[in-house]
Amino acid sequence: MGPLNGYTVLELAGIGPAPMGGMILADMGAEVIRIDRAGTPPGLHMKDVSTRGKKSVALNLKDPAGIETLLRMVENADVIIDPFRPGVCEKLGIGPDVCLQRNSKIVFARMTGWGQEGPLAQAAGHDINYISITGALFAMGRKGEKPVAPLNLVGDMGGGGMLLANGVLAALLETANSGKGQVIDAAMVDGAAQLMWMFHSFEAMGMWDATQRESNLLDGGAFFYDVYECADGEYISIGSIEPQFYALLREKAGLSDEDFAEQNNPALWPQQKEKISAVFLQKTQAQWCELMEGTDVCFAPVLNLLDAAQHPANVARSTYIEVDGVTQPAPAPRFSRTPSQVRNSGSDLGADTRSVLTDMGFAEQELDELKRDGAIV
């Protein structure tokens, strides 16, 4: 019984950030009903972590009866998640104006890359493009080299899925007070720009050179905030920014006063990085873990996706769980009184069509006709 128990969310099937937003809401207890497209091959959802805890209703949205079925579902829902390009829902006849006429309290949450308006609104794009025009991609990489294409965490997930879920939660709180729904324009460009807030602050304070990579405190320029190779070819991360943490790093790693007494002189960072790199090559990752892990050095081993689930700290906190044989991150954040949970892995295509529609007031005869006519699966 998570904190969103009692809320119903309709999630139009999409990829990436919109399903992630729906996953967060499902973990928190909302009944999230994924509106799948009739004709999609079955079996695709069972190992897709983003479908966990969701039900599947398969509709033919090219059929007027399928559209009407969805709109009747809207009357029984609190939220609808739109993952399409701007205008697609309007063309289908399920845009926000139509949905708000059917249910004046509906929260219509729209997830796009470039936003609902603007010169790029109708252009295709992916995470790497959205973070390109926010300064995020430019800042990632080594000095003198091209920017590094990161995992799609900044645009799609942090700037997209998290932003969408945050907007839905805020809108539901407001609806509880006003009794009115509204439309959310969640754009990955906007979210990625928000994630860059700290670097705008640093630049304004004269603490960041926005024209350079690997030249600043948090981009790998500082020798005390970077990733280093060990004797066994594995890697460790160091983040000893504060003076007391840096002093402990010097003690644990045996860094000499001659080379490392001065911490915050960027002119010395390149040669200090070269020398500390040689120090970290003298021990294996496991040896550095034994020496530094759990101390205030601000240290951690760099683990791959599989090893991360086995790390003792993650095991102790149950940071990862297994659902139907698939290892995946546990719901977050954690609630003391109404804990989130993964109720089950994702339903297969259309597995819940009849039961969900029955619960929403559709008669058995109606469902038989809709199925016969191909409006539902």
Image (cartoon, grey):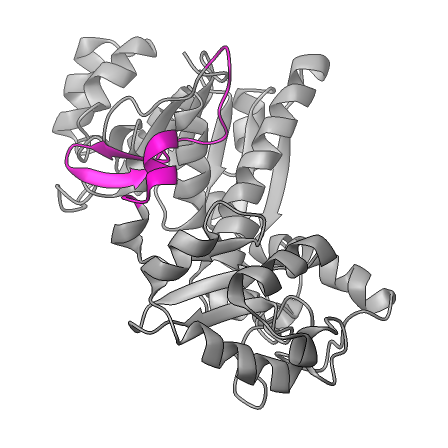
Tell me the residue at 39%/21% (across/down). Answer: 73
**With 34 as the anchor, is 139 left or right in this view?**
right
**With 212 as the anchor, is 309 left or right in this view?**
left
Which residue of the protein is positioned furthest toward the bottom in this rendering?
A: 144
Give the percent coordinates (x, y) of residue 149: 45, 73
Query: For residue 212, which quarter of the picture?
Result: bottom right
Region rendered in magenta: 309-338
Give the percent coordinates (x, y) of residue 9: 44, 26
User: Considering depth in this image, is 374 or 329 the residue closer to the camera?
Assistant: 329
Q: Quadrant of the C terminus?
A: top left
Give the percent coordinates (x, y) of residue 315: 32, 35
**Residue 148 visible in the displayed image:** no
User: Considering depth in this image, is 252 or 66 the residue closer to the camera?
Assistant: 252
**With 311 as the anchor, is 238 left or right in this view?**
right
Tell me the residue at 63%/80% (across/down). Answer: 213
Residue 275 in the image: above or below residue 116: below
**Residue 10 visible in the displayed image:** yes
Give the percent coordinates (x, y) of residue 67: 36, 33
Tell me the residue at 20%/42% (across/down). Answer: 47
Residue 91 in the image: above or below residue 29: below
